[in-house]
Image (tube, grey):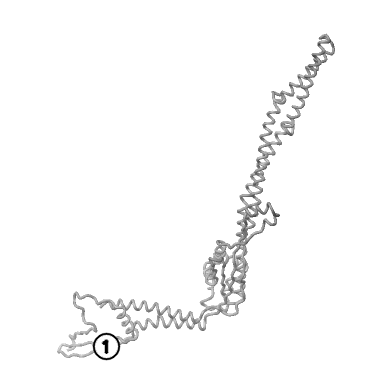
Amino acid sequence: MGENQELKTDESRPPREAGAPAPAFSIRGASQQLAQRLTGRREAPRPAIIEDSVGQITLAAPRTRPSAYLISFILFVIVPSLVASLYFAFLASDQFVAEARFAVHTAQIDMMQVDKMKSSLSSAAATMTSPSMAGQEAYIIATYIRSRAIVDDLSKDTDLRAIFRRPEADFWARLKDKASAEELVRYWNGMVTAYVDAPSGVVTVSVRAFRPEDALALSNAIIKASEALANEVSARARADAMKNAESEVRRDEGRVQTALGDLRSFRDSQGYIDPGSAATTTGTLLTGLMGQKIKLQNDLFVATRAMSPEAPTIQSAKTRLEALDHQIDDLKAKLTGDSPEGRTISASLARFESLEMQRIFSEKLYELSQEGLERARQKAEMQNIYVSTFVPPAMPEEAKFPERFSMSVIIALGLAIVWGILALTGAVIEDHRY
């Protein structure tokens, strides 16, 4: 009688007719289903009906089991929230915070004002500057504080790994053993923050540590490293600003030396210092000889009227006249004509004037480049970057982190919200199955 038993289960939901549309989705209905499944107060399933071959009917009691939503809520929300609360209440170590604020300034100078002051005041007054807020420099310092560069710089004098692995630190908050350089940088960015206030350019640095003295020491070390970076940037800017001006001065100085060397070689080859003076002297001598020649010709003309041509006086006058002609011809040839040595004063004077013009031009360029170098030096000196700390770090007396109560509440609420979203999604999917 019990060989051909047939099991028939009466479902809690009536079967959907063929072709009938699916029921419309309702947030309220899904929420009610979720609440029923979570609390276990869902509609009890009907007992199973067992009919044997002779028509006897027996009822099988339904099996009951805990709701999967309740189990997931306990595992996903209650247990982690309880663990987090216990951690923050009994295990989380105190973290002390040291905060410092500084501004990055640069000194600028108005070159037109400097020129005006140079003409009326002393050079000392011309170096007066007015500080102005730096924009890009503040972000450079803040980026440096968040980079690996400052970690490497501070590691030269400070054992950062020992500071972040103090015995007071708990297992979750401390730096792990044998941490790599990249892991140390990530941990550093979690313990040190640098914020730049865009309107004012003020940099705020907050340092967390497990000991008050460590937080204060790290804050002072960060400020010192930032000042060193500002000095390095300033020195590099000065070097870049002076580089072009100094190269221009060296180039113009070489031109002056070349012009002076050419002029010296010309003077050595010609045998006199100034062809202009030589031309003046030669012209003066030529004028005197021509005057003597004219006087001697007059005397000879008078003597030929009174004496015979064979007279000694006339012969002497003719000899002197020939000598004067020869001297005059030599001076003319030396001055403008063809000289026996192939050198004339007029050609030498033209070459000398060309060399002298090159010398004057080179010296003028050299003078201008020196003035440009001086202006570049003043401008570079007036563009120094410096860090002005107006809120120095102080020794913290109370632990600011962790925020035990608020973090416990935030974790619990966050887990509950995530679980609610996932559970509601699952309830909607299950509701659309039927």
Residue 410, percent across and down?
45, 79
Q: Quadrant of residue 63?
A: bottom left
Which quadrant of the view contains residue 271? top right
Residue 102 left/right relative to 337: left
Residue at image point 42% right, 83% down? 78
Residue 89: give x, y in percent of width and height.
51, 83
Which element carries disc 1, helix, strand or loop? loop
Q: Nearer the viewer, residue 163 or 199?
A: 199
The residue that appears at 43% across and 78% down in the rendered structure is: 414
The quadrant the C terminus occupies is bottom left
Q: Residue at x 74, y 24 (%)?
A: 331
Q: Position of residue 256 (x, y in %)?
A: 67, 41
Above or below, 376 relative to 173? above
408 sits to left or right of 328? left
Where on the picture, by quarter, is residue 103?
bottom right
How many residues crowd mark 1 within 10 Å: few (<14), some (14–19), many (20+)? Answer: few
Q: Nearer the viewer, residue 167 or 36?
A: 36
Q: Which amino acid lies under the numbered mark 1 shown in the image of this protein?
A: Pro
Residue 245, given in percent of the width and then of the height, sits at: 63, 49
Disc 1 target residue: 62
